Image: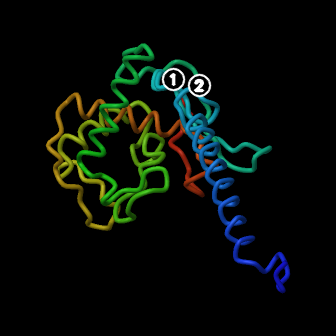
């Protein structure tokens, strides 16, 4: 037997480090699968892509003490009801366009990105679009020609012309509408949405 105590030996701590590392690796794998399941479209907090066929509002939930998205009656995007597959294809096109045009270089999406330009997390619900009836047209005009349809709110910051196609514009707007239906635990804080349903 050695003269030192068992808990002070190098061998004991080496085994502890291996055991803890292996245990944490298993925890990481379990958390990864849990996170993937929780953020997959069609779950409680991340709606199915066909949510773009419905009115989306953002109201205060007394129980959770925060604003949450509420999916309402049918209000199809661009007046066309899409199947789940068609909606997914359109939202995916919008997401890929947002990524390809590097929108996060200036904007924030779901808490990620830059703070130079407005947060796009709830852009579909932004009262800056005036009213619910004009929103799709104003968003389309802005994305097609941001210089002429600039919305600077006194900052003089202007979005560059992204050179997007009509279908990419439809995709971006679908992506923004879908993203506004994601339950983000009240983020962004203090956001006041555009009145919905003619309110």
Question: Would residue 14 be found to the left or right of residue 136 on screen?
Answer: right
Which residue in the protein does label 2 denote?
Answer: 72
Disc 1 secondary structure class = strand
The quadrant of the picture occupied by the N terminus is bottom right
Which residue occupies 37% across, 15% down?
80
128 relative position to 145: left or right: right
Residue 38 located left or right of residue 48: right
Examine the rendered structure and indicate whether residue 7 appears above or below residue 94: below
Along the line of sight, which residue is nearer the eye, 128 or 112? 112
Query: Are circles 1 and 2 on residues that touch, CB within 8 Å?
Result: yes
Task: For the C terminus, give its image quadrant.
Answer: top right
Q: x%, y% of residue 172?
A: 32, 37
In this view, the residue farthest toward the front is: 1
Q: Position of residue 189 (x, y in %)?
A: 59, 57
**Count of marks, rendered view:** 2
- Quadrant location of residue 164? top left
**Residue placed at 30% from the left, 54% from the top?**
151
The image position of residue 121, as x and y in percent, is: 46, 48
Residue on which the image places disc 1 = 54
User: Which tag, 1 or 2, sits closer to the chain's start?
Assistant: 1
Residue beneath the point at 17% across and 33% down: 165
């Amino acid at each position: 037997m050695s003269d030192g105590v068992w808990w002070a030996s190098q061998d004991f701590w080496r085994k502890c480090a291996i055991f803890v590392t292996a245990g944490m690796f298993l925890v990481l794998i379990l958390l990864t699968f849990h996170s993937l399941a929780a953020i997959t479209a069609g779950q409680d907090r991340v709606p199915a892509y066909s949510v773009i066929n419905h009115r989306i509002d953002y109201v205060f939930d007394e129980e959770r003490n925060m604003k949450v998205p509420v999916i309402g009656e049918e209000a199809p995007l661009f007046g066309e009801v899409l199947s789940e597959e068609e909606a997914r294809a359109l939202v995916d096109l919008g997401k890929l366009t947002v990524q390809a045009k590097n929108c996060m270089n200036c904007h924030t999406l779901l808490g990620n990105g830059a703070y130079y330009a407005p947060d796009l997390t709830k852009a579909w619900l932004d009262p800056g679009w005036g009213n619910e009836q004009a929103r799709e047209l104003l968003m389309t005009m802005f994305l097609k020609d941001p210089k002429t349809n600039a919305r600077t709110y006194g900052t003089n910051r202007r979005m560059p012309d992204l050179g997007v196609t009509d279908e990419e514009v439809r995709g971006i707007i679908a992506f923004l509408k879908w993203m506004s239906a994601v339950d983000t635990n009240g983020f962004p804080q203090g956001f006041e949405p555009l009145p919905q349903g003619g309110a």
